Image (spheres, rainbow, N blue to C red):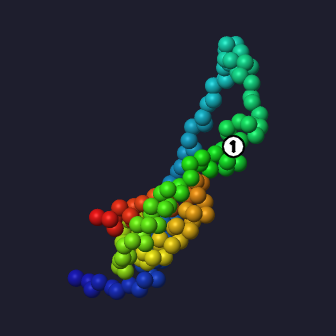
Amino acid sequence: MEKAEIKSISDILKNSLVKIKTEKPIEITPPYPIVVSEIEPQPKETKRIIEKSKVQSLTNDTPTSNWISGDIRKSQNKWDGQILKLETFFNSIDLPTDEIRLSQCEVITDVQKFITSNLLCVKRYNGNMTFEPYLMRLEKLKNILSV
């Protein structure tokens, strides 16, 4: 029996490269071309429907333009009553010093800072629906602390 020769990594790589070069190259066939059928013209009925519905330009009176400008995001209802209830509740209890988990993704590490910053934001943007999540988080905290 012959002794197995110990080969260096470079010898192994050279041999594998030689094998790769000597092997028959893989032939790749391009995919078949996609054939697009001729586009059929629209029926006359569809054309009439399109002509009847005129495109309306956006003015300051249309609801879409208000939504785009952000006016619709401002609710007619102010949150004054809710804010007052939250302030009186948080002022009447001793706030915990440890962290509180509102949900799986919401963790409050400093309860006092959380309440202060969220109340400031809610007061500043009172009634603006963009900032409603701040109010909702305060309500969640109130529900957790009141249990």
Farthest residue to the top: give it: 44
| Residue 94 horizontal side relative to residue 1, left or right | right
Question: Would residue 47 be visible to someone looking at this image?
Answer: no
Q: Residue at x 47, y 71 (%)?
A: 115
| 126 with respect to 13 (left or right) | right
Q: Which residue does the image show at 60% across and 34% down from the upper left? A: 34
- Which of the 4 image quarters holds residue 52? top right
What amino acid type is highlighted by mark number 1?
Asn
- Mark 1 Cα within 10 Å, few/some/many (few <14, many 20+)? some
Q: Is residue 102 above or below residue 42?
A: below
State the image coordinates of residue 62 (x, y, percent, origin top left).
71, 36
Looking at the rendered image, the quarter that the N terminus falls into is bottom left
**Front residue of this view, candidates 135 and 52:** 135
Looking at the picture, does residue 23 appear above or below residue 76? below
**Image location of residue 126, percent across then percent down:** 58, 58
Left or right, 64 with respect to 8, comes to right
Q: Residue 29: in sight, yes or no?
A: yes
Q: Judge by depth and name the residue closer to the eye, 25 or 143.
A: 143
Element at label 1: helix
Question: Which residue is located at x 44 percent, y 67 percent?
Answer: 88
The image quadrant of residue 122 is bottom right
Residue occupied by mark 1: 66
Seen as rendered, the residue at the extreme left is: 1
Residue 36, given in percent of the width and then of the height, sits at 63, 29
Tell me where residue 21 appears, x and y as whole percent.
52, 66
